[in-house]
Every structure is written in C-alpha cells, then in structure tokens.
C-alpha cells in the first residue's frame, strides 16, 4: 500500500515564507520642565502672535472681454432744399436768382460779400459788394 502524507495546517504554515516580526519600539516621552504662570502666558502669547499662513489662492489668468464695438449713430445727410423765390410787383414777377446773377454781372468781379436791397416800386436793386455801393435797374416782366 502506498502511503500518502497528509499535510496539516502546521506544516503548511512552516512551508510558507517566514515573516519576521520586528519588536515594537518604545518611545519615551521626555518630561517638560515645570513652567511658571508667567512663562506659560508668554508661550501662549507667542503662539497667538505667529501669523497663520494661509495657502495662496491660485491666480487665474484674467479673462479678456472684448467690449462690443460702439457704432456711432449715423447723422442724417443734410438735404439741400431748392427754393424758388419770386418778387412780385404790379402784376409782374422776378425770380431772386435772376436779380443775384444780374448784380454779380454788374459788379464785374468776384465779391466776398454782397448785400442786395430790392425796391420794386422804383424798379431798382441797390447793392453793396465788398464795401462798394452801387445800383442797377430791375425789369419786372
């Protein structure tokens, strides 16, 4: 008959790798020297006086905000109004543009400033061009 060996729990533990247990280290607390009330108060004050350092917050990169572009309101384009201005007297009429054109032709040269005074009852136009006084006849048709 063949004999078989039975393994027991003790032999299985022995076959496993042996674990070395280290002895627990003993810590010896040193006794603090006896403090007087004044020394204890100083120590407490020093602990309070030490500023507690806080962790600095992480600085985030500033977010660049683009402001919406301001659009200037459009100014209305001035509309040049055409004005037809007539002087009527005794049933006849003369356009003012024609009087101005005739005054410029009578003066003979370009003037910086012209002032015209129209007297329909005399059929005359009196004008001052650059300080020179003159007159001309106006024909009402």
Image (cartoon, rainbow, N blue to C red):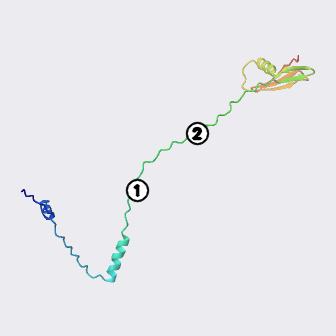
How crowded is the residue under tag 2: few (<14 C-alpha within 10 Å), some, or many (20+)? few
Q: Residue at x 34, y 77 (%)?
A: 42
Q: Residue at x 72, y 28 (%)?
A: 79
Q: Position of residue 92 (x, y in %)?
A: 90, 19
Q: Position of residue 95 (x, y in %)?
A: 83, 21
Q: Residue at x 14, y 61 (%)?
A: 12
Q: Position of residue 127 (x, y in %)?
A: 81, 24
CA separation in Å, label 1 and label 2: 36 Å
Image quadrant assignment for residue 58: bottom left
Q: Secondary structure at mark 1?
A: loop
Q: Is residue 42 left or right of residue 124?
A: left
Q: Secondary structure at mark 2?
A: loop
Q: Is residue 44 above or below residue 109?
A: below
Q: Is residue 123 above or below residue 52?
A: above
Quadrant in which the N terminus is drawn? bottom left
Tell me the tag on residue 70: 2
Tell me the tag on residue 57: 1
Q: Residue at x 87, y 21 (%)?
A: 124
Badge 1 or badge 2: first in the primary sequence: 1
Q: Is residue 26 left or right of residue 139?
A: left
Question: 75 or 14: which is nearer to us?
Answer: 14
Question: 8 or 3: which is nearer to us?
Answer: 3
Q: Position of residue 69 (x, y in %)?
A: 56, 39
Question: 131 or 21: which is nearer to us?
Answer: 21
Q: Is residue 55 above or below residue 113?
A: below
How crowded is the residue under tag 1: few (<14 C-alpha within 10 Å), some, or many (20+)? few
Quadrant in which the C terminus is drawn? top right
């Amino acid at each position: 008959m063949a004999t078989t060996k039975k393994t027991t729990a003790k032999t299985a533990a022995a076959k496993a790798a042996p674990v070395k247990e280290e002895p627990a280290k003993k810590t010896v607390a040193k006794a603090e020297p006896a403090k007087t009330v004044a020394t204890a108060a100083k120590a407490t004050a020093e602990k309070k006086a030490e500023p507690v350092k806080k962790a600095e917050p992480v600085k985030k990169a500033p977010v660049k905000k683009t402001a919406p572009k301001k659009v200037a309101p459009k100014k209305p384009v001035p509309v040049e109004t055409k004005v037809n201005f007539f002087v009527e007297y005794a049933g006849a009429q003369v356009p003012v543009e024609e009087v101005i054109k005739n005054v410029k032709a009578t003066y003979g040269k370009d003037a910086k400033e012209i002032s015209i005074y129209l007297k329909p009852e005399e059929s005359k136009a009196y004008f001052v061009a650059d300080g020179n006084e003159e007159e001309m006849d106006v024909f009402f048709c």
